[in-house]
Amino acid sequence: MSSLGSSVGNEARDKARFREADEVATIRRAQLLRYEYLDTQNYSLPNGPIFDIISVQEMYKDYFTILSADVGTYVFAITNRTPQSLISSLKSRFQDHRIIIKMTSESGWRDIMKIYDPPKVVQYQDIDISSYGSSSNLAQVSKTLEDVHSDDLLGYIIEQAYKLESSDIHFENARDFVRIRFRIDGMLHVIAALTHPKYYQVQQSIAVRAGISSSSNDAQTSHLSERVTGTDGQEEVLNMRIETVPTVYGQDAVLRLFNFDIELLNLDNLGLDAREREPIEEVIAHPHGMVLVVGPTGSGKTTTLYSILMRLNTPERKLMTLEDPVEYGLDGMSQIPVDTRNGDSFASKFRAVLRLDPDVIMVGEIRDEDTAHTALQASITGHLVLSTFHASSAAAAMSRMLGMVGRNPIFASAVKLIVSQRLVRKLDPATRQAYQPDPATIKHFQENLSDLPSGIQVPQDLNSFQLFNPGKSEENPFGYKGRTSILEELTIGEEIRALLGAEILPTSQQLEEAAKRGGMITMYQAGLLKCLSGETTLEEINRVM
């Protein structure tokens, strides 16, 4: 079966399982509360919809519906979300009628509500990126989402995010509404505001398809797939990771979109110059030792590691990864999930993997001393170990690793490269606008670039240069297009080797100064050079640094 066909089949099975569980839970609750259970899977209103007794808005608000209105008797269906006070309210409101209460599942309630509120024929307009930030567009998109039928709502939001090349979709609960934001090129943009009842429909769609609870009091992680159509009209399956967390006003959710093309996992696409490529190419040519890529969440660490893995992915090598969770499915390597929330650990899985005789091992993250020691030992026994690490700079990462493993004679020979990186937005060359910096900015560049290693070419004369601001156009109102990496690369030179052999472990500042004397360009210096070359802005460098 194709991946598309498999996705469709899995989706149908997930929906069926969720519906069955919903009905079973409702039967039990109906028995407990002594209400008659109503199965709506093959149900139609006896005398058609009734609009003159209860409004559709009321039924949506309190998650109930009216089933029939015979002479002297009204029959209502309630759900698990119906307030208990509603039943007393109905009896008080219709004192001259006999009130009969039945209980149906939330899925069943939605079935009946489709009779009262049939799916509207909606012209689903694409969200226009050129109008982000304007109140009129927010109102327009919000209205469109309110009109989109519940069965289509989640798919519509995902497809719009995909078309706009978003990396994440954020659903954020406030007192009176739920905000939707897309992260595009690392920046969040407000797309729309949903009412809470409409967002509940989105929650239910996520819960059904991702196998999670829409009312859990704990944080949850899961996955789902969606068929999407790109701007070229081609349909494909988009994989997403789901994270939910309860908040004061409801359950927030973030959908991370893995909308990547495997062909893009290439070192050529990272925006590295020849100087930056050289130490990485050296590791690829001699794959042994340890390589760490450090930076905050969203800095492109995983993409960099996968790009290196793709270069190493040849038939004569055995590649294995340990990930929490597995983000990209790649051919030619064994990818092993590590569920740390349920008791798994990178260290135990790492030791098991070593018994399978791999050549290259990628560890999703080094989080503890046990994993650090295991990785260090593996890296001096003929393996190449790639991993991520949380630190603010390459020198800080080395200092933290030393704190984990202590004074270890094999450390200097094991670590081949530490890369610290960030992602910055690239200026749109078609709209960028040049300007002359003020004297204070000129002095700032001169001071920070005064100790560059010899042989480094500065794009402009530091006594007189121009910088760039983003411009605007109807097609691109932000002036940025895509992102590029800025990074620093720390390798073990003689001075650092001497520091590692000293009685007292070096500080991160001592390591950074020694690395700079050995030819390292700091991440901030790399960012300033990209400003001078017109690739990005000083404001963007300062934002991410």
Image (spheres, rainbow, N blue to C red):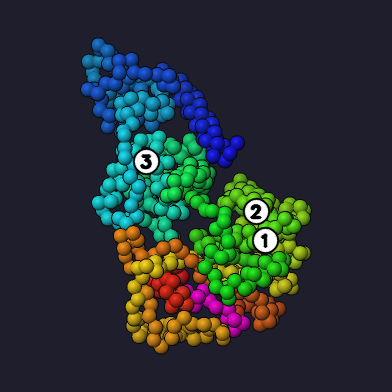
Secondary structure character of the magenta stretch overall: helix
Disc sitting over residue 312 in the figure: 1
- Left or right: residue 359 compared with residue 41: right
Identify the residue under disc 2.
Answer: 322
Which residue in the structure is indicated by mark 3? 199
Circle 3 or circle 1, nearest the eye? 1
Magenta stretch contains residue 517: yes
The answer to whether residue 369 shows anywhere in this view is no
What x and y, as percent, mark residue 277? 59, 71
Magenta range is 516-528
Which amino acid lies under the numbered mark 1 shown in the image of this protein?
Leu
Which amino acid type is marked by label 2?
Leu
> Do the residues under discs 1 and 2 have CB atoms within 8 angstroms?
no
Sequence-first disc among 1 and 2: 1
Marks 2 and 3, how far apart in space?
Answer: 35 Å
Q: Residue at x 44, y 46 (%)?
A: 233
Tell me the distance, in whole angstroms, between the alpha carbons under discs 3 and 1. Answer: 45 Å
Viewer-proximal residue, 474 or 531?
Answer: 474
Q: Position of residue 106 (x, y in %)?
A: 41, 29
Decide: is 432 above or below 329: below
